Image (cartoon, rainbow, N blue to C red):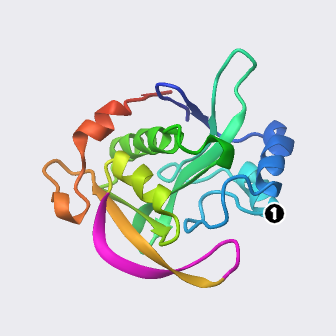
Amino acid sequence: MFIRSERLFLRPGWSEDRSELLALVAGRSHGPRLTADCVPYTEDDARRFLQATGEALLPRFLITLPGQGGAPIIGCIGLSHHRGEAELGYWIERELWGNGYGAEAARAVVSLARTLGHARVVASHFLENPGAAQVLHEAGFARTGRIAERRCLASGVLCSALEYAVSLVAGGPQGSGGCDDDALRAGRRRAA
């Protein structure tokens, strides 16, 4: 499965991506703390990410930035299971933060999640990562009002994380993670 958004191309990982992905993961250029387990954090995670076939309803993608010099990998994004719901996880190379790539990729995957039949997608971020709140908001997520203890994939320590959700059902309640259709429309994608 592939997704083309306005500036990005989201695609599966292939064995040929190993060295590029390992360089990004080894450089920790994506930031110190992640909550979702659907994207690679360590070199072993990166190897498993490229070898896994994944579940059809929980796709994972490399985020690439097409340009004249090719389409370098700038991050990963995907869906995983969390307490019986689809959870969005992502990371973007740190040098590219602030360009809207995370929100653009998240909107594309949320739109795909709706197409795949998910009624709701959840996400979370650690309290010390306010930039992730902006990404989630721009992707149509709303705070649920819950703070949960989540294991930090970097340290293995439990840390407080704000929870978000987006309802993909027409007329979903806004205050509990209702879908911001305007944000999703801004991230329309073509899936192949």
Q: Quadrant of residue 16?
A: top right
Residue 180: x %, y % from top left: 24, 46
Amino acid tagged 1 = Asp
Name the residue at 34% across, 53% down: 118
Q: Secondary structure at mark 1?
A: helix
Figure label count: 1
To which residue does mark 1 refer? 44
Residue found at the far right of this picture: 19
Find the magenta span and give its range. Answer: 142-156
Residue found at the far left of this picture: 171
Residue found at the far top of this picture: 68
Residue 104: x %, y % from top left: 46, 38
Taking depth in this image into account, of 99 and 13 the one nearest to the observer is 99
Q: Quadrant of residue 154?
A: bottom right
Residue 8: x %, y % from top left: 55, 30
Q: Tell me: 181 left or right of 171.
A: right
Name the residue at 78% across, 46% down: 21
Name the residue at 37% across, 30% down: 188
- Answer above or below: position of 13 versus 136: above
- For residue 143: magenta? yes
Q: Quadrant of residue 31?
A: bottom right
- Answer above or below: position of 118 versus 64: below
